Each structure stands twice: as structure tokens, then as C-alpha cells.
Image (tube, helix red, strand yellow):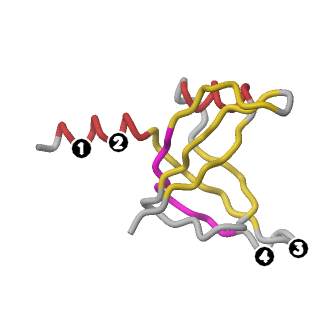
Amino acid sequence: MPVTHDLKILPEYFAAVMDGSKRAEFRRFDRDFKVGDLLWLHEYKDGEFTGASDSVLITHVLPIHHLCADAYAMLSFARWSETLDAWEHTL
């Protein structure tokens, strides 16, 4: 069963997700991130939420614990709206 993870994201990175130039996120692996889960990204600036948010679908999880002392992972993703558009075109 897919899970939704609420995450803070700085404005410059949020903008890059929205324009499609950012397709991955390097994060501490402090949650059980899995392919098919949603990341609900909430723009966060100067200690406050801006009100902007959007969701992305995790398409790949690359654990990189062997490179760091702490557990981290590179999460590849697609914007949820793009995923739905692609799915609708297959019908």
C-alpha cells in the first residue's frame, strides 16, 4: 500500500521540481521510502510554509548507506500530474 510522506522543500528546489528540471531528491533515509509512495512537497521559506505544495511519485530508491555514516537515499520521482497524464494515454 503506497504511503504519503510530507516533506519540507526550499523554494529554489520546489521551483525546479515544478518546472521539471529536478527529478531526484537526496534525503536522510529516516522513513520507509518505497517505489510507488508519494512525496507531498511543501514549500518552506524562512521557517514558515509558503502555502505552495505538490506531490511527486517515487519511481526509484537508491540507498547509499555504504557511502555515508548515516542512512541516506537518492529518491527519483515523477510529478504526480505527469504520471496521471501518462497513465491516461495508455487507456
- The earlier-in-sequence mark between 2 and 4 is 4
- Identity of the residue drawn at 68% across and 32% down: 43
Residue 58 lies in the magenta-colored region? yes
Q: Secondary structure at mark 1?
A: helix
**Foreground tag (1 vs 4):** 1
Q: Secondary structure at mark 3?
A: loop
67 left or right of 75? right
Marks 1 and 4 close (CB-CB < 8 Å): no
The x, y position of residue 78, in whole percent, is: 46, 43
- Identity of the residue drawn at 81% across and 70% down: 67
The residue indicated by pointer 4 is: 66
The residue indicated by pointer 3 is: 69
- The earlier-in-sequence mark between 1 and 4 is 4
Q: Secondary structure at mark 2?
A: helix
- Identity of the residue drawn at 84% across and 71% down: 70
Magenta range: 55-63
Q: Amino acid at mark 1?
A: Trp
Marks 3 and 2 close (CB-CB < 8 Å): no
Give the alpha-carbon distance from disc 1 to disc 2, as whole Å: 6 Å
Give the alpha-carbon distance from disc 3 to disc 2, as whole Å: 34 Å
Q: Is residue 38 above or below residue 42?
A: below
The residue indicated by pointer 1 is: 87
Marks 1 and 2 close (CB-CB < 8 Å): yes
Q: Amino acid at mark 3?
A: Ala
The residue indicated by pointer 2 is: 83
Q: Amino acid at mark 4?
A: His
